[in-house]
Image (cartoon, rainbow, N blue to C red):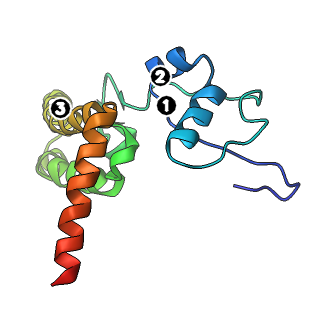
Amino acid sequence: MRLEDHRLNVAAAFDRDFIRNCGTPGAAASRILSESGFRSFSDLESAHWQGTPSLTRRLSVPASERVLVIGDAAGYVEPFTGEGIAWALASAQAVVPLVLRGVKCWTPALQDEWASSLKRLLHRRQWMCRQLAFGLRRTWLVHGATRLYSRFWRSESVR
């Protein structure tokens, strides 16, 4: 994105091993742009890059007395799936029975029950994201899937 002072703001999510293989985040960005058919920017490799921790996170204790944490606050998986709202709604729906019980009579056992429920819910989502990440890290698989989709899409658009 071009900023008001004409500087360029570039953001990317890289696999740690990919950065290690390329040497720097700038070199990784240049390689991705090149392999995608885009031109690279001259200052990209020497630019200052700011890293973040791993994108997949989970609270070790997602509950406290009369507090059951949901959505991204409870934990999230890699955001490239675009499921942030779906995750928030799924965790909100899952917590409802516990909230209704807690309103009538709060017990510390509800905290443990929520932690277990949330762990199961997150595990399913993380499994799907790990599978997607596995595929995205294999260029040959991405190219094959893209070609297959392209053929299907063309045949559907002709009808």
Residue 1 in the figure: left or right of residue 57: right
Q: Where residue 131 sits: x, y (%)?
A: 21, 34
Is the C terminus in the top left, top right, bottom left or bottom right quadrant? bottom left
Vertical placement of 8 versus 141: above or below? below
Q: Are marks 3 and 1 in contact (CB under 8 Å)?
A: no
Identify the residue at image location x=52%, y=15%.
Answer: 20
Q: Earlier in the sequence, mark 3 or mark 1?
A: 1
Q: Earlier in the sequence, mark 2 or mark 3?
A: 2
Residue labelled with disc 3: 123
Identify the residue at image location x=17%, y=73%.
Answer: 155
Q: Are marks 1 and 2 in contact (CB under 8 Å)?
A: yes
Q: Nearer the viewer, mark 1 or mark 2?
A: 2
Q: Nearer the viewer, mark 2 or mark 3?
A: 2
Disc 2 secondary structure class: helix
Identify the residue at image location x=79%, y=35%.
Answer: 43
Residue 129 in the figure: left or right of residue 98: right
- Which amino acid type is shown beneath numbered disc 2? Phe
Is the N terminus in the top left, top right, bottom left or bottom right quadrant? bottom right
Q: Where residue 66 sits: x, y (%)?
A: 29, 39
Residue labelled with disc 2: 18
- Which amino acid type is shown beneath numbered disc 1? Phe
Query: In this view of the protein, can residue 52 be seen by the observer?
Result: yes
Q: Are marks 2 and 3 in contact (CB under 8 Å)?
A: no
158 and 113: which is toward the camera: 158
Instruction: Farthest residue to the bottom: give it.
Output: 159
Real-space Cα distance between discs 3 and 1? 22 Å
- Mark 1 residue crowding within 10 angstroms, few (<14) / some (14–19) / many (20+): few
- Which amino acid type is shown beneath numbered disc 3? His
- Mark 2 residue crowding within 10 angstroms, few (<14) / some (14–19) / many (20+): some
Vertical placement of 45 versus 39: above or below? above
Real-space Cα distance between discs 1 and 2? 7 Å
Residue labelled with disc 1: 14
